[in-house]
Amino acid sequence: MCALAAGQRGRRVLVIEHANRCGKKILMSGGGRCNFTNTGTSPANFLSANPHFCKSALARYTPAHFIAMVERHGIAYHEKELGQLFCDESSKLIVKMLLDECAAAGVRIETSCGVDKVATAAGGYRVQTARGNFDAPSLVIASGGLSIPSMGASGFGYEIARQFGHTVLPTRAGLVPLTLSGKHQENYADLAGVALPVSARCGKAQFDNAMLITHRGLSGPSILQISSYWEPGKELLLDLLPQHDIEAFLFERQAAQPGAELKTVLGDVLPKRFAQRLCEVWFTNKPMRQFVHAEIRAMAKLLAHWPIVASGTEGYRTAEVTLGGVDTDGLSSSTMASKLSPGLFFIGEVADVTGHLGGYNFQWAWASGQAAGHAA
Ligand SMILES: Cc1cc2nc3c(=O)[nH]c(=O)nc-3n(C[C@H](O)[C@H](O)[C@H](O)COP(=O)(O)OP(=O)(O)OC[C@H]3O[C@@H](n4cnc5c(N)ncnc54)[C@H](O)[C@@H]3O)c2cc1C
């Protein structure tokens, strides 16, 4: 995105990519259909040490701008849910669109081209690669984060940032499944594949969406979202019945079906195997008439504030994003330019701006790329 924007301005642009093709994460994104933006994008959808930093770029290159490009290229798309736009056919079309735009703007692309070293040179930077040295007045680092090392992710961008005096904020995996261990894992493991809507909360963050039980822990959109806010030691709570006033529901069933067992009653509003497990491990399964009011109130409270003791996350191997990164204090929010080294830029995931699940990370990549592409 940055290359095509700079190329359209008449700049001579070279993209250096160490993988054998461009846009591998685009290709694998959204289950192969690329959730390329979110129509509801706002700065509130991003985590950063400076929550204001992303505002300028996001305001100047909006989802509507990207959608216009997608439509110009005749790519069919649809909204899945919550403003998330996906290709009808394939992520390949998004990569092709960007490559076609780059070609039209005269951008040169070198793939399978590793960078050995970056140094300052007269009037700019020298990038040393296996294919020789390239000198340029502007150098844009768009090397992404640490997620999915098997796809070419590396800490390269952070090294360059440090080399030129930038602070790199601690990085960790985000939008990632959580792992459980010991009895916490044993209690759920054989329910792998069971999914239910929950409201996941950590501090002030809250996400209402599906949770999926896995062999090693918990996943699904609500868990991926909350994982970006969770760190070991932080309390993580689930409302297992977010669409119900559970206390009222249990009292109502007690009155209407006093002979029904708890597991049957809970099985009406939760997946049956999950309801049964709750009754085996945490509650006592007995006819509703045998519960005193205090027991029902305590059960309702627990179901609405279910504590999850996560042992960790699945890490960068499966994480969709990397939290932290190049401190935005050292960057201009309107151009992504380094405040320390003129002509150096950091865009996309390498910077300390991380979106929620749902197309926001690509929107940040497009918007920050455009911002730098108009200045580099
Ligand atoms: C499985 C998965 C699914 C995702 N799905 C979505 C989604 O549907 N919607 C969404 O908004 N976000 C999604 N994301 C997040 C999104 O892919 C990233 O936030 C986005 O790609 C970041 O863009 P970027 O250009 O900053 O970095 P990247 O897309 O990671 O690109 C960085 C590029 O730099 C190259 N590179 C790295 N080091 C070097 C080096 N030393 N020399 C040369 N080249 C180098 C890499 O090979 C790569 O091509 C997903 C992520 C994953 C892992």
Image (spheres, helix red, strand yellow):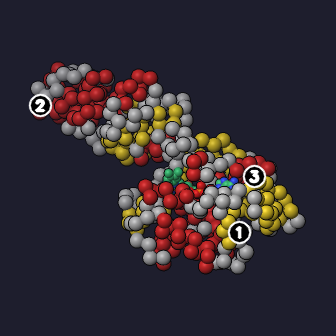
Contact check, label 1 and label 3, Cβ < 8 Å: no
Q: Within 10 angstroms of label 3, few (less than 14), some, or many (20 or more) residues?
A: some
CB at disc 2 and ligand 1 closer than 8 Å? no
Question: Where does residue 277 sit, x and y in percent of width and height?
Answer: 28, 28
- Horizontal side, residue 223 vs residue 159: left or right: left
Give whichever of discs 3 and 2 has the lower sequence position: 3
Q: Position of residue 353 (x, y in %)?
A: 60, 52
Tell whether 118 sits left or right of 198.
Answer: right
What residue does disc 1 label? 14
Whereabouts is ligand 1, in terms of quadrant?
A: bottom right
Identify the element where label 1 is drawn.
strand
Describe the element under mark 2 as helix, strand or loop. Answer: loop
Question: Circle 3 is placed at which residue position?
Answer: 160
Mark closer to the observer (1, 3): 1
**Residue 134 place in picture, x, y as percent:** 79, 65
Location of mark 2 (residue)? 257
Which amino acid type is shown beneath numbered disc 3? Answer: Ile
State the residue at coordinates (61%, 52%). Answer: 152
Q: CA distance from mark 3 to mark 2?
A: 67 Å
Would residue 274 be found to the left or right of residue 222 on screen? left
Reading the chain from its start, which is encountered first: label 1 or label 3?
A: 1
In this view, the residue farthest toward the right is 122
Query: Which of the two residues, 210 or 51, is positioned nearer the viewer here?
Result: 210
